[in-house]
Amino acid sequence: MRSSATGPFLPPLRTRIDTFDMTIASTVDYLRMVWPAELSDVIFEVAPGPASVIPGVGVERFSVDARERRITLYRLPMQRLSRMHQVDELHQRMIVESCVFRAVAELLGKDPWDLAPDRFRRL
């Protein structure tokens, strides 16, 4: 019989939801540091999934409401429906970060690569 490493009465040390939330929070913190004026009043929220599927497009990973300055990130589509060539923690984090970057870029009307150009520059 198998049990978790933390024992039957203790919660796991780090769950997938905790990792997802930490990835969202750290990416949002980074973007707010780079774009403080543009993102100061933006509300970020996490939901399990969208209310409906868009015909011909599929399941959204995020939604952007520019009028209300709100970005909603959908956890289950990002975690379960994203195709990765390698399934590990690093690639899962990259999928989540890319969705946050794309959502912020859509809100600001910029290209995702323009949000943090120095972050990806090799020395």
Image: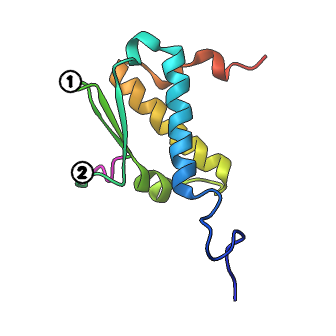
Task: Name the kind of residue labelled 2 in the image.
Answer: Ile
Indicate the position of residue 45 as horizontal and vertical percent values: 36, 39
Write the start and end of the magenta stretch as one range: 55-60
* Residue at 30%, 49% in the rendered image: 57
Q: Quadrant of the N terminus?
A: bottom right
Q: Residues within 10 Å of mark 2 (few under 14, many from 20)?
A: few
How many numbered marks appear?
A: 2
Disc 1 target residue:
67
Task: Classify mark 1: helix, strand or loop.
Answer: loop
Mark 1 vs mark 2, CA separation in Å: 21 Å
Q: Is residue 57 magenta?
A: yes
Indicate the position of residue 32 as horizontal and vertical percent values: 48, 20
Chief SS of the magenta region? loop
Indicate the position of residue 118 as horizontal and vertical percent values: 64, 15
Q: Residues within 10 Å of mark 1 (few under 14, many from 20)?
A: few
* Residue at 59%, 41% in the rendered image: 94
**Residue 116 occupies quadrant:** top right
- Return the residue found at the far top: 37
Task: Name the kind of residue labelled 1 in the image.
Answer: Arg
Front label number (1 vs 2): 1
Q: Is 8 situated left or right of 31 in this image?
A: right
Task: Classify mark 2: helix, strand or loop.
Answer: loop
* Residue at 22%, 55% in the rendered image: 52
Disc 2 target residue:
54
Q: Quadrant of the C terminus?
A: top right
21 lies above or below 66: below
* Residue at 66%, 23% in the rendered image: 120
Q: Is 105 situated left or right of 1 in this image?
A: left
